[in-house]
Amino acid sequence: MPQLNTQTDFFASGPSFRLAATAFAALLVTLSSNARAFEIDTGNPDVAIRWDNTVRYNYANRVESRDPKIGNSAVSDEGTYSFDRGQTVANRLDLLSEFDVTYQKRFGARVSAAGWADAAYGSTSHSNPLPPLSQIPSYVNHQYSDYTKRYYRGPSGEWLDAFVFGGADIGSVPVNAKLGRHSLYWGESLFLGGNLNGIAYAQNPLDLQKGFATPGVEAKELFRPLNQLSGQAQVTQDLSIAGQYMLEWDSFRYPEGGTYLGPVDFAFNGPDRQFLSSQLGFAQRGNPSEPKQHGEGGLAARWSPEWLDGTMGFYWRNYADKLPQTFLTQVGRNISRYNLIYADNIDMYGVSLAKNIAGISFGSELSYRHNTPLNSTVLGIAPGLPTEGNTKGPRGDTYHGLVNAVGVIPKTPLFDTATWAVELTWAQWAKVRSGANLFYAEGFAPCVGKDKWDGCTTKNFFGTGMSFTPTWFQVWPGIDLSAPITYAVGLSGNAPTVFGGNQGNGNYSVGLGVDVRQKYRFDLKYIDYLGHYRSTNGTAVTSQNGFTTLLKDRGFVSLTFKTTF
């Protein structure tokens, strides 16, 4: 994340926790007698109806002490002060309900919805208790906004999938189509870092609130479906083509300021304001400048010739960004305003290759983005809102690439089996087409006297993500154990696009998983974050390299239970 352009002089108890614990115990008893999917017998072999419900309970506790330099920063104190060491940071119950109807396995519909409630959150935010920070919270009167309360405290919910699908043969060509809210994922990227630098970037908005809380999660688990029309045709045995046309736009969902994993207090859709200075006062958060709701689209082809013994993909997409640039669009004493700006009309051209070699599954991508938004000076001054789909910030052309591998290790003296995955990502900016005065990069005005450790974009970026999960079967009758380990970090340089990656910035997790009769899943994990910041005054963060740098004091232990019935 670019440097902010703002500087300013043990286990829970109580009624809410006991109520959640009691409900959880009752839930376990109920589910233990019926922990399988519900299939409705229609009496017609051509019609299948299935209803799946996944319940997840997550308890998390902060185990790392507060970093005083993060806590003394006017743009990051509220996140680290939201919970103290030893306090419960998550006491959350989630429900995912999925309903599918199919006819002759070629036509049908799918609807899914999610609900949640988290007893760890109340209605109030917390900031550094000492003035002046105690007097300048990003939420008015330290009261969470309705948006933040909905997505963090709940109870609340939302529709996810809602689409119909069908297939038919046109001549000898099988054709399938979907209409409604669903997700597509083109290319070969595996992890979040790969998606942000991949062909599938912004093809779906992602749930970064979940992504920040679960390091190592596969990108496909973060999808938020959108209303669209998509189709695929198997033209020949070796060649398939696909397309999509978007009927809806939405942004990524972010870790909101003032929450435990919200690194920046004023961002994104929840906080009300950001204090600028004693002369200017607060800048109020204005409505986001969003692109039109329809018009994004793309085409893809997948080719698997026998001689290749693999699959090549070719892609074009025209899309609107789902990550924002953030600017001060009005500046003056007590009248300042900042807005999240989303640009459209970005073209992406890409090629991919997937191939198995010696039992290892390899994937790779190379893509080019034309007219994409670039890293900008956050809270830089760009007076006036741009027209729909435009931005006054930097735009230009970038190259992105990745290579990954997935494999399985057979039985050894140390474990029965193990799965592993590793991904290397690369990004390079090629050309700045507009807004160079706000391009937060080495060699440009906003980074004069600064370098990559202040968050300045470099010409090239390299990053990696990896996971390793050894498994032990039947440790006790009906019980399998696993020990998932994940790690992601920027290796060199800073990416040219928002959230694309920063050197030394990353996360890791170490855990123990228990599968009981392949019906109930328990996970115990330690999760923490990496990053590099500077403190020129010795008391507070004055610059940082990467978004999650400001989470490096947020290490926590998480216990999760999940089952499907």
Image (tube, helix red, strand yellow):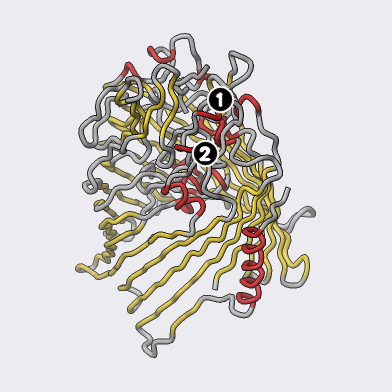
Instruction: Determine which residue is flagged by label 1.
Output: 73
Query: Looking at this view, is 550 or 455 the one in front?
Result: 550
Q: Is residue 79 visible?
A: yes
Left-right relation of 210 to 400: right
Query: Looking at this view, is 141 or 392 the one in front?
Result: 141
Q: Is residue 205 above or below residue 389?
A: below
Q: Is residue 483 visible?
A: no
User: How many residues crowd mark 2 within 10 Å: few (<14), some (14–19), many (20+)?
Assistant: many
Query: Looking at this view, is 274 or 24 the one in front?
Result: 274
| Residue 126 drawn at (x, y percent) | 56, 38
| Residue 442 drawn at (x, y percent) | 44, 15
| Residue 64 found in image quarter | top right
| Residue 178 drawn at (x, y percent) | 29, 63
Task: Return the mark for residue 104.
Answer: none
Instruction: Determine which residue is flagged by label 2.
Output: 258
Residue at image coords 26%, 53%: 243
Residue at image coords 38%, 61%: 159
